[in-house]
Amino acid sequence: MSRTRALVLTGLAELLGMSLWFTASAVAPKIASEWHLMPATTSWLTLAVQLGFVAGTLISAIANLPDVLNVRRLFAVSAFAGAITNAVFAMFAHDAATAITLRFLTGLFLAGVYPPGMKIIATWFREGRGLALGVLVGALTLGKASPYLVNAIGSQNWRINVGVASVLAVLGGVIVFAFVHDGPFALPNQPFDLTQATDIVRNRAVRLANFGYFGHMWELYAMWTWIPGMLRASMAPRLADVGSFVVIGSGAVGCVIAGRYADRLGRTVVASAAMIASGACSIAIGFLFGGPAIPLLVVAAIWGATVVADSAQFSACVTELSDPRYIGTALTLQTCIGFLITTASISLMPMIEHAVTWRWAFAVLAPGPILGTIAMLRLRRLPEAVRIAQGRR
């Protein structure tokens, strides 16, 4: 099996599996109208997934699951379990409490899809790892955007549109289980080691890479969660749904471009440039709210491309700077804390929007990429940084 084929298949599986993430968010207006939900309650359809993912990654990191278990089986089983909980939500949820519980469980199981997918790719790539992980994160970005496209062109019945994602996730699990193999850089399954989580925190270089990731995450999921709401408030609903898919999905292009240049110019440089660009967009986007749709969508698409472009590079840094025997644990711990941070920024946005309107609301996200850029530039100066991308730090 070639590494290109492994990347294509794993990327496709990641796209299909992560389509579960925003299934409820894409149809949230219909659910809110049908169930007579307040905006604060509706936002929990997204927040529950984030919290479930945090819980799942915390369990996985403490137990070293991506390093102790066969990572492809972990991916497949998790995708199947997430598909089941999403299908139950589509068929049987009729109130907020049931829906939020099922969305939490979906997020819990997705913790076994995202970080294990990155570990699979790391076993195939040393040279060109930034581009490979960029392709993978680009694929999952398209997966997360896909429910908005399904909602725009699919059924008027939101339950059918949600159920489509379960079918896709099952296919993703089958692809990884049946057609993907471990790469030449895979190590044997490791014994459980509780100290790995604390060792990762003590590693200064990994810590700075994580700080960069945390600043990036403050911005990313709040943008992904609330940009559809801004677009719906500024233009026709169907155009807003198509626009949401384009804006979020444009991140796939950003990830691939950033990955290619990160392997050539340096991870910390490219990640910093992406955060500077996305932070500027978070401030500028509000000035276009309520105006013509095209300029708003253009700037939003640029933001969508840059806001996630750096994501894979933080993960690549962690795989290169941490203990190679436990990179699955290191990646999982990174995502656990990062997604915990997203719950704060996602929750904050409605309050900020209510206070200052969409004109200024997204500007509250700018400090994240600013602090993330500082962390990456500090990492660049460390002696350990020579291990990043074969010296192209």
Image (cartoon, rainbow, N blue to C red):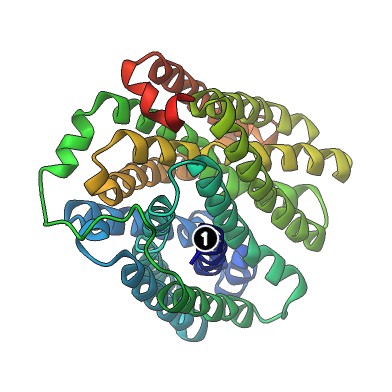
Residue 134 locus on image (x, y percent): 55, 46
Callout 1 secondary element? helix
Q: Is residue 202 left or right of residue 278?
A: left
Please rate how many residues cluster around mark 1, counting C-alpha atoms within 10 Å: few if below 14, some from 14 to 19, many from 20: many
| Front residue (pair 259, 5) | 5
One can see residue 211 in this view: yes
Left or right, 147 with reference to 340: right
Q: Quadrant of residue 269?
A: top right
**Residue sitting at x 54%, y 67%:** 9
Q: Is residue 95 above or below residue 207?
A: below
Q: Number of marks in the image? A: 1
The percent position of residue 119, horizontal first and vertical second, equals 37, 54
In the image, farthest residue toward the top? 381
Q: Is residue 354 visible?
A: no
* Foreground pick, 242 / 270: 270
Query: Which of 196/341 is in front?
Result: 196
Question: x%, y% of residue 181?
Answer: 40, 68
| Furthest residue toward bottom | 91
Please say if 231 is above or below 68.
Answer: above
Amino acid of disc 1: Thr
Q: Position of residue 143 (x, y in %)?
A: 58, 62
User: Residue at point 10% right, 43% down?
Assistant: 195
Residue 198 quadrant: top left
Query: Along the line of sight, which residue is nearer the eye, 255 or 232?
Result: 255
> Image height check: is 136 above or below 131?
below
Residue pointed to by mark 1: 42
- Is 60 on the left or on the right of 362, as rendered? left
**In the rendered view, does 96 fall on the left or right side of 278?**
left
